[in-house]
Amino acid sequence: MGDTASETNKAKEEVLPKFGHGMLDQFCFPPGFINLNHDSYGSLPIPVLRATEKLAVQVEQKPDLFIRNTARKMLQEVRARVAQVVNADVDECVIITNATHGINTILFNIDWQPGSRLMKIVSSTYGAVQRTIPMTLDRTTGVELVSIPVTYPITHSDLLERFRSTLVSIPCHAGQKVVAIIHGIASKPGVLLPWEEMVAICKELDVWSVVDGAHLLGQVPVDLNKTQPDFWVSNGHKWLFSKRASAVFYVPKRNQHLIKFTLPSSIGYVSPQDEVPSATGSGRFVTLFEYCRTIDYVPFLSLAPALDYRQSLGEEERITAYCHSLALEGGKKLGEVLGTEVMDNSGELTANMTNVRLPLSPPSKLSTPQLQDLIFRICDQLSEEHGLMVNLYVHDGGWWTRCSAQIWNEIGDFEKAGKRLLELCKQKEEEMKQLASGEVATKPEEV
């Protein structure tokens, strides 16, 4: 029996595309270009690109009919498919532009009261969300920020203990809301967090969980019916192969009454002043997001051909297994070439991205503007002159690179990346000394 199953699996594998450099002809990269930064903006497969081109033509053939009618029907089909992927009710999922849009929508809709608390994890909260938090505090009165300082690596158990103890320490007040922003996979460092366990702690302590799952879809399995966060959002254009910008925004039915408006407000807004509400319940929630006039619906609808493409590659487990294994092995190889180490030796923090220390002196004498400018110039130089794209950042006083492992990558890409990075680090070491000379020593913010 076992031999028969093994033979069946082998036969299936033989007809599926082989991952590695053979997949490069299904993407738009120029010859020789090594893309190890898929996680920032995604990389659209050519089959999905062609499908979106057909959709764009369909829109222009009969714009009125498409925007008023066809798009709504197609969106319903898309929502049904993505709801299956995340195991949620279809009327709990709507499609928006990106995770930042979702987080903004949630924080704007919450009826904050004096004494409420908004909690974030310092050093791994995404930059746009970092700025959304003070914007929220600036427009409300009496809401306080609670920060959990974390440097990586940290074990999941230690992080959960710190998360719980911080929530428990918050003084309780009548009418108070405590809202925790939780990252499923942080951006920089690109680490996997125990987000499902953090949601469980929030439930136990009567805290609202807002999950920024920007990097989750297509990287790790998601079961929202099981986890039941209060709010959850994830990009499709990062790891799910849809066209940017497209994301899945999940609000369980128990919380949909809290989402009263979109950004910007759509024709579906239901006002308390309406004599006869245009929609109620989950129908109101879905209507709120389905018709925002002349936005481009093509990225939203591209989630369907993206899922078709992923099916053509085999099961989700096949894709994620390859990328995860390559991230672990690629990180080790990159560390060997650079003469440094990976951030996550245990593998607990690693999904499909790896973080490796760069052989550069700490940037403690660079101002934040100098540091930001230097990082962007290094990335541009790597891309334009070295045919390489990675992500660079500073964490805990040191330089790191975050590299994504995708279906077109092989272990040799990490080795080549290490050699090119090593050469460039030697050049930039001298440049940093010149930048810092005569400057007042300041500790730069993490970038």
Image (tube, helix red, strand yellow):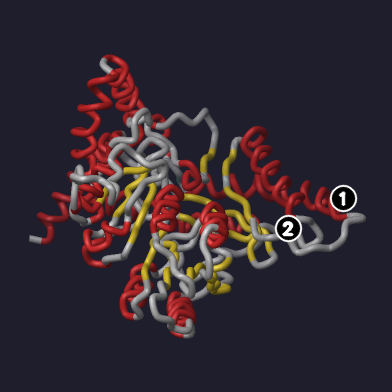
Tell whether label 2 touches label 1 (CB within 8 Å): no
Q: Nearer the viewer, mark 1 or mark 2?
A: 1
Instruction: Give the secondary structure at mark 2.
Output: loop
Q: Residue at x 14, y 49 (%)?
A: 8
Q: Residues within 10 Å of mark 1 (few under 14, many from 20)?
A: few
Task: Out of 184 and 60, give the one closest to the viewer.
Answer: 60
Q: Residues within 10 Å of mark 2 (few under 14, many from 20)?
A: some
Residue 63 lies, with reference to residue 321, above or below; the image says: above
Q: Does the rendering let one see residue 331?
A: no
**Outermost residue to the left:** 1
Q: CA distance from mark 1 to mark 2?
A: 14 Å
Residue 446 position, x and y percent, is 65, 60
Query: Which residue carries the number 2 mark?
Result: 360
Residue corresponding to mark 1: 434
Residue 89 visible in rendering: yes
Picture coordinates of residue 142, whole percent (x, y): 53, 70
Give coordinates of residue 48: x percent, y percent.
33, 31
123 horizontally vs 69: left or right: right
Q: Is residue 405 above or below residue 445?
A: above
Q: Residue furthest right?
A: 438
The secondary element bearing badge 1 is classed as: helix
Q: Quadrant of residue 304?
A: top left
Q: Earlier in the sequence, mark 1 or mark 2?
A: 2
Label 1 amino acid? Gln
